Image: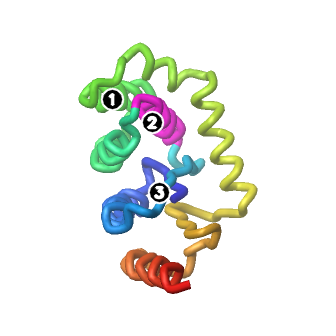
Amino acid sequence: MCSDFDCPHCALAAPLVEKVAKAHPELRVCSVAFPLPMHRNARLAAAAALYADGKGKYWQMSAALFARQSEREELSEEDYTEQLLKTGEAFGLDRKGLTAAMAPGPILARVDAQAAQATALKLDGTPYFFLDGRALKEIPLGALGAAIDDQVASKGSN
C-alpha cells in the first residue's frame, strides 16, 4: 500500500488493510510512504512511522496516525510535530530518537526515496494498492478485500 498519513482515503483504507492481513497471514503486507504535496507535514508523519518501524511498532504507529489524522489538519509544523511526538511516546518510542527521525537525515531521506519511487511509477494519488506487482487501481475500496481473496484463492489452485 502506498499511503499518506494525512490522506482521509488512506485513513479509511487502513482498517481494511489490517483486516486483509489478518485474514491472509501468508501475505506480506508492505507500506510505502507517499506523502502528497497538498499535505504539507505528511513527510514528518511518514518519518515517525518509519522510525516506529525500526522499533517494531510500525503498524501500531500507523493506526494511531490515521486515527488522529483530523486532529493534525490545521496545526502548525511545530504543533504537528509535537502531536507526532506524543503519539510515539504513547507506544514507548523515545522522544529524542523520534525528533531526530523527523529532522533532515537518513529517515526523511528514506521517506523521500519511497515517494520518488511512487512518483516514478506514475502513481496519481493515495491509497494505492499492489498485489503480486499488479496495481489494483480500478478496484473500489469496498471490493478490495474480495479482490484479494479471489487472487489468493486462484494462486492456491495453481
Q: Residue furthest right?
A: 120
Disc 3 vs disc 1: which is toward the camera? Answer: 3
Distance (Cα) linking label 2 and label 1: 11 Å
Q: First in sequence, mark 2 or 1: give its number.
A: 2
Callout 1 amino acid = Gly
Say which residue appears at 38% left-offset and 67% top-offset: 24
Callout 3 amino acid = Val
Q: Which residue is mark 1?
A: 88
Callout 2 amino acid = Asp
Q: How many other residues sit within 10 Å of disc 1, few (<14), some (14-19) or many (≥20)?
A: many
Q: First in sequence, mark 3 or 1: give its number.
A: 3
Q: Which residues are magenta?
A: 40-55
Q: Residue furthest top?
A: 96
Q: Which residue is mark 2?
A: 53
Q: Residue furthest left?
A: 90
Q: Position of residue 30 (x, y in %)?
A: 51, 53
Q: How many other residues sit within 10 Å of disc 3, few (<14), some (14-19) or many (≥20)?
A: some
Disc 2 vs disc 1: which is toward the camera? Answer: 2
Q: Position of residue 102 (x, y in %)?
A: 51, 26
Q: Which residue is mark 3?
A: 29
Q: Is residue 47 magenta?
A: yes
